[in-house]
């Protein structure tokens, strides 16, 4: 079977450079934009404000978002854009503000300009928005026929963002390889677009494994180094290319289904998206019986503080029946876990979770005895 290919590769313009936010007004002029709306949050606004230039020749309206990326909020933003006859919408913040900005821009066919304050997702790159309801429950993923007009990444801003959000971004981006690979390697023939998606996904994993620790040290010290710059670009851009070239073959598989199932457990709510996805990567690998790969990832997980087992997420109390219920939620009909090869059942998923727990306990026991020099 020939895969059906759609490419939504990139924003119209992407600039990652120290000080690039200072050129915002020049970019608006180049595009003939004189009246704009800035959408922002509160934490992200405090982080962004010191780096933002004064826009002297632009009429600027502001909107503080409500904290969730909903259709109601998108419509409020679209209402402001229409009411004041504005020409573009600028989003300054994390993935949720980015997604809102794109959704409002797409609704009115206006350019969306994005200034990310986190490197936790590839939302600034992709031309889609993940929509939720007011209570934060997932509603849909809306894909737009427009690229983002401009993305300005100033690494200095991200160098001062919270480390746990960067770690979560690393977890989410690590999944790019495992989820794209498990789907793409099933194909008998590989169109060139999917070769690119596959390559970008591998590049994500390799860069993360190589640079994350040094990047995190720099971030914790509020400094910039090459490793941090590579991680920022990997989480925002290279991860975006995987989905951009791979579409249905380069997005989610088993890891995100495990994440989705975990969102129904209240005790898991304090775990960030990327933490739950990182755990999902290991469950996906356990389902495939890839124990050597799991073992090779565990030191990385431990160094970064990514959760490898249920206890790491405060879920050590889950028993056999709970795990089966979790597994049932992970394999609902529309779940991307069914993009994995073979028949995926709740019993298999629950067994994989239990085997992973055992593998982890053995690994920890082995590590302790090694460290203590006991053979
Ligand atoms: N469109 C896509 O392709 C895509 C891809 C992955 C995820 N997403 C979506 O992105 C969203 C998650 O985005 P996120 O992880 O960036 O989180 P987020 O946008 O929810 O932000 C997390 C928190 O960090 C704060 N924050 C932002 N920048 C900060 C800074 N520099 N310093 C301190 N605090 C700061 C925010 O105010 C917020 O409280 C989810 O809705 C997810 O579905 C979209
Ligand atoms: Zn994700």
Image: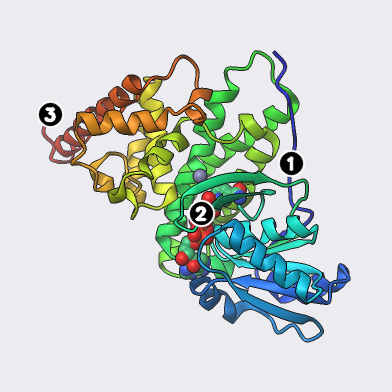
Q: Name the spot of residue 274 as percent of width and height, x first.
A: 44, 48
Q: Which residue is mark 2?
A: 133
Nearer to us: label 3 or label 2: 2
User: Which quadrant of the view contains residue 252?
Assistant: top right
Q: CA distance from mark 3 to mark 2?
A: 54 Å
Element under label 3? loop
Q: Name the spot of residue 184 as percent of width and height, x first.
A: 60, 24
Q: Nearer the viewer, residue 274 or 101?
A: 101
Badge 2 vs badge 1, beta-carbon distance below 8 Å: no
Q: Which residue is mark 1?
A: 8
Q: Residue at x 40, y 20 (%)?
A: 288
Q: Name the spot of residue 127 as percent of width and height, x first.
A: 69, 49
Q: Residue at x 44, y 29 (%)?
A: 332
User: Which quadrant of the view contains residue 149?
Assistant: bottom right
Q: Which residue is mark 3?
A: 375
Nearer to us: label 2 or label 1: 2
Q: Residue at x 78, y 77 (%)?
A: 84
Q: Is residue 13 above or below residue 362?
A: below
Q: Name the spot of residue 339 as percent of width and height, x first.
A: 53, 24
Element under label 1? loop
Nearer to us: label 3 or label 1: 1
Q: Is residue 9 above or below residue 31?
A: above
**Residue 160 seen in this snapshot:** no
């Amino acid at each position: 079977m020939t895969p059906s290919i759609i490419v939504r590769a990139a924003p119209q313009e992407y600039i990652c450079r120290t000080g690039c936010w200072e050129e915002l007004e020049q970019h608006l002029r180049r595009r003939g934009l004189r009246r704009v709306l800035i959408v922002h949050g509160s934490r992200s606004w405090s982080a962004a404000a010191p780096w933002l230039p004064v826009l002297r020749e632009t009429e600027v309206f502001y909107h503080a978002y409500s904290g969730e990326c909903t259709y109601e909020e998108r419509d409020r933003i679209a209402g402001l854009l229409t009411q004041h006859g504005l020409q573009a919408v600028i989003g300054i913040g994390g993935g949720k503000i980015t997604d809102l900005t794109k959704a409002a821009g797409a609704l009115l066919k206006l350019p969306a300009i994005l200034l990310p304050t986190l490197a936790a997702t590839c939302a600034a790159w992709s031309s889609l928005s993940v929509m939720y309801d007011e209570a934060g429950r997932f509603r849909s993923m809306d894909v737009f026929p427009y690229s983002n007009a401009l993305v300005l990444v100033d690494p200095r801003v991200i160098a001062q963002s919270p480390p746990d959000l960067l770690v979560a971004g690393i977890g989410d981006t690590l999944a790019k390889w495992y989820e794209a690979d498990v789907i793409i390697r099933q194909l008998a023939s590989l169109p060139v677009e999917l070769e690119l998606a596959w390559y970008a996904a591998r590049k994500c994993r390799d860069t993360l494994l190589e640079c994350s620790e040094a990047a995190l040290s720099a971030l914790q010290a509020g400094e910039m180094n090459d490793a941090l710059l590579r991680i920022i670009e990997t989480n925002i851009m290279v991860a975006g290319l995987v989905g951009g070239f791979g579409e249905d073959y380069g997005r989610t598989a088993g890891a995100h289904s495990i994440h989705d199932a975990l969102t129904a457990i209240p005790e898991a709510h304090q775990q960030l998206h990327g933490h739950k996805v990182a755990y999902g990567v290991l469950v996906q690998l356990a389902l495939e019986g890839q124990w050597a790969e799991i073992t090779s990832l565990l030191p990385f997980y431990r160094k970064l503080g990514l959760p490898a087992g249920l206890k790491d997420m405060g879920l050590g109390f889950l028993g056999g029946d709970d795990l089966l219920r979790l597994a049932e939620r992970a394999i609902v009909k529309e779940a991307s876990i069914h993009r994995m090869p073979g028949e995926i059942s709740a019993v298999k998923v629950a067994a994989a979770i239990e085997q992973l727990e055992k593998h982890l306990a053995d690994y920890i026991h082995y590590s302790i005895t090694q460290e203590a020099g006991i053979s």
